[in-house]
Amino acid sequence: MRRTKVFILGLSFILLLALTAGGVFRIDDSQTGHGARIQSSGQQIVLTESMAKVNNVKMGEEVKNQLDTQEEVTLIFHNKKDTSHYYDHEATVDFVNEPSAEELDEITRDIKGWVIKHLNSIYIFRSTVMETPEMIQYFNQRKNIEYAEPNFILMQNEVNGPNDLLYQEKYQWNLPVIGTEQGWKVTRGNEDIEIAIVDTGVDLDHPDLRNRLVKGYNVIDEKSEPDDDNGHGTHVAGIIASETNNNEGVAGMTWFSKIMPIKAMGAKGYGTTFDIAKGIVWAVDHGADVINLSLGNYQPSKVLEESVRYAYKKNVVMVSAAGNDGSDQPTYPSAYPEVLSVSAVDYNGNKASFSNYGDYIDIAAPGVYIPSTYFNHQYAALSGTSMAAPHVAGLAALIKSANPDLSSSQVIRIIKNSAIDLGEQGKDRNYGNGLIDVNSALQEAGREKPSLSKREKSLFDWLR
């Protein structure tokens, strides 16, 4: 059975390449309103006049370079190539008991600084005189301190069919090769299932998304809507739930499930661990069934880890991109055991050249030239593990639609067990358990008996 799956997958890739070489996917540039071309760099496909020209893997490298040289941002070198960043003169502090006004006054006097923001017992302090390591040493010597750590920066990790235009024109190669069309015969989704996108927000007025959205949250500016000023979150959202079969744009993996937009990263495509964690908790507390995290950092964070554990204990499936540095350095939240870690494959079923890899990888999904929605009512084809992760989040939503009473651990197990084995036999460092297989996963979900256990309380229960 496994060999049959691999054989069918291989035929699909060969057919795709043959059609591409034969010009089936090409449209004459002289035609009004349409054009398709691959730039000499091989980094971008232009599909329509409204298709944005974006190389998001390169953009991610540029953001890293900017952070590397930006004042008030400090680097942590994990090896010769991989770095993490945090805001200097800042510290994230969790108190054992809620600090009194007198205690906060004493701390701010000692560090000659102030409180930037807080989430119940977790506070972010900024000092005018202390470097971050000195601040952490100061807090660790105090009583009533659970932990103190830097304010880390997380970055986006890019890189019977429906009648949607770009699907009909065969640009969405990613959905057929993972068995999505066959899976739709089992379920096309359920509007009661909500997928939170903790990212740069979502274009709230995009014609392919505006009917698929539920109430969201802007972590950065609570008075503003979670509108996307970067494009990354909108692209991720479209892969999962772009309005399907509406004669427009692209098809989403689920036809009916809803998107919950959580803006926790700004226009430049990065945000802090505190804001990401706050976005996760808000999503859980407002009914998210699945959370997509197309972002990461090489440095583990306790505040982020606590929010991940909180979501898992509340039976929410979390999916995260592995990263785009071609590195085996574990990234977070992807490497946390409660999270499905996703690597990216190309047209040929090979690990994408940019995709991170390692023992923590759970699953693989398409991540090269993935067409989807983009901000300012546009469409774009982007590459990255950020594009691979929402395929898995979409599959998790379909599984929950097929069998709503399944626990998060059952959904994760089904995704792993039903995958098409790639690379070395069994689980490996490039593909984890293999390439997701939507049809097989949904068939298995229909046979699975729910085993929900009583929800446990966690450190974040006081947020409700």
Image: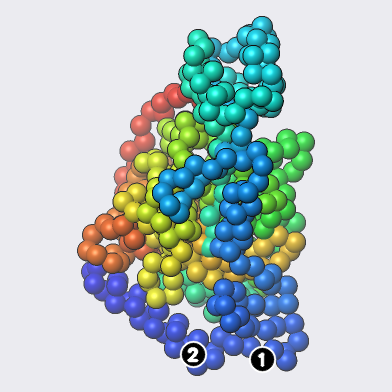
Q: CA distance from mark 2 to mark 1?
A: 15 Å
Residue 427 rendering spot, x and y as whole percentages: 26, 57
| Crowdedness near tag 1: few (<14), some (14–19) or many (≥20) residues, C-alpha within 10 Å | few
Residue 420 rendering spot, x and y as whole percentages: 31, 65
| Crowdedness near tag 2: few (<14), some (14–19) or many (≥20) residues, C-alpha within 10 Å | few
Which of 420 and 90 lies nearest the eye of the viewer? Answer: 90
In the rendered image, which residue does mark 2 sit on?
21
Q: Secondary structure at mark 1?
A: loop
In the rendered image, which residue does mark 1 sit on?
28
Q: Amino acid at mark 2?
A: Ala
Give the left or right position of residue 177, taking residue 270 as reference.
left
Which of 384 and 213 lies nearest the eye of the viewer? Answer: 384
Where 195 falls versus 302 (above or below)? below
Which corner quadrant holds the N terminus?
A: bottom left
Give the left or right position of residue 365, taking residue 451 as reference.
right
Q: Secondary structure at mark 2?
A: helix
Residue 35 visible: yes
Of the numbered discs 2 and 1, the one sitting upstream in the chain is 2
Which corner quadrant holds the C terminus?
A: top right
Residue 305 rendering spot, x and y as whole percentages: 46, 34
